Image (cartoon, helix red, strand yellow):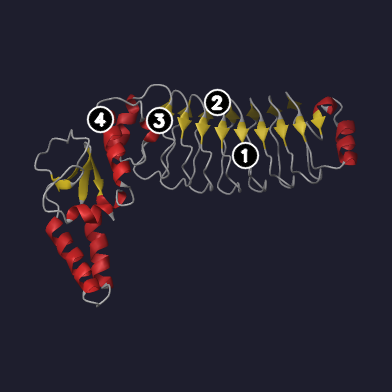
Amino acid sequence: MLIYKYIMLEKPKKNTIHEQTSDTPSTSSGKLEITKDTNLDQTTKILTNLIEGIQDGEGVNREDVNKLKKALDNIEVNLGPYPFPVTRLINLSKEELESQAMILQEIYQGNFSNLNQLKIITPLISKQLEKVNGDLDLESLTSAEGLTLPQTVGGDLDLFNLTSALGLTLPQTVGGDLDLFNLTSALGLTLPQTVNGYLSLHSLTSAAGLTLPQTVGGDLDLFNLTSALGLTLPQTVNGYLSLHSLTSALGLTLPQTVNGYLSLRSLTSAAGLTLPPAVGENIYLFSLTPEEIQKLKEDRPDLAGKIKKKY
């Protein structure tokens, strides 16, 4: 518990917490500063009682634990120039605190070159994102807590490591790609009305709660989706459409147009499958029987040359 250790230090040293007495945001990249008017003395007393109880063999007092959690939630520290609740920083190592402080200092000065390494964010930091032109790379964020995105992102929006859409509000328009590769649930997710590049929802296994844009300007990656129930696909996908893990066409309505390839490699039955009117490249149906493949080719002679049982 790095924060607890720092609280108990008597003298501030490099990378230690000390009280900030000025209203001016810190410009130090190597210190954690407790914002003024926080009840640090009470928190230290509760922590001391807990430690003494353990040392005296009395065990952990649950009431003191709950008091400590509440007290820590009310304490803010400045990491670089920005305030954070202590509880947001507890799980960061010393090295991570140092690197995050440096990145936050850069952001404060309008330098976004290391934005892709940012692991923690607040609404105050989010305001700086409006100054970013082109791509917005937030690939290291694993939580949307504190994240407020601009209404429009002109380039790519990279949220590669986000696993939950809880608290996430995406822009109305993404001018490039939207990468939500590691998102495992669509619950609470509202996608932009327009994605002009590819849309990666690679790790989704269920379409529950998923509403896709009407048009995806590039590829649409739904690689791990195992069921089409509840799935409404765009009318047009201008790149490839990957439904690699889908085993059944039950409930599946494909787009009118797929300009790239269409991957249905795990589909084990052609029952209920209606191919799009237009597919620009190959259609991969590796798990269907030769007889089913032949029947599809006979039904859709216009696509017969594109229907493939292997690469």
Counting residues from the start of the chain, the first of labels 2 and 4 encountered is: 4
Q: Residue at x 59, y 32 (%)?
A: 214
Q: Which residue is drawn at 12% across and 38% down?
A: 23
Of marks 2 and 3, the one in the foreground:
2
Q: Distance between the residues labelled 2 and 4?
A: 30 Å
174 displayed left or right of 125: right
Determine the secondary structure under disc 1.
loop
Are circles 4 and 3 on residues that touch, CB within 8 Å?
no
Figure quadrant of the N terminus: bottom left
Task: Give residue 29's position: percent from left, percent from top.
Answer: 22, 35
Q: Mark 1 points at which residue?
A: 222
Determine the secondary structure under disc 3.
loop
Q: Mark 4 points at which residue?
A: 108
Counting residues from the start of the chain, the first of labels 3 and 1 encountered is: 3
Front-most of residues 265 and 79: 79
- Disc 4 marks which amino acid? Tyr
- Disc 3 marks which amino acid? Gln
Q: Name the residue under label 2.
A: 197
Task: Give residue 147's position: percent from left, percent from top.
Answer: 36, 40
Q: Residue at x 29, y 42 (%)?
A: 97
Counting residues from the start of the chain, the first of labels 4 and 3 encountered is: 4
Counting residues from the start of the chain, the first of labels 4 and 1 encountered is: 4
Residue 26 seen in the current view: yes
Q: Distance between the residues labelled 4 and 3?
A: 21 Å
Residue 29, above or below 91: above
Q: Distance between the residues labelled 2 and 3?
A: 17 Å
- Disc 2 marks which amino acid? Gly
The mark found on residue 151 in the picture is 3
Are circles 3 and 1 on residues that touch, CB within 8 Å?
no
197 displayed left or right of 74: right
Of marks 4 and 1, the one in the foreground:
4
Determine the secondary structure under disc 4.
helix
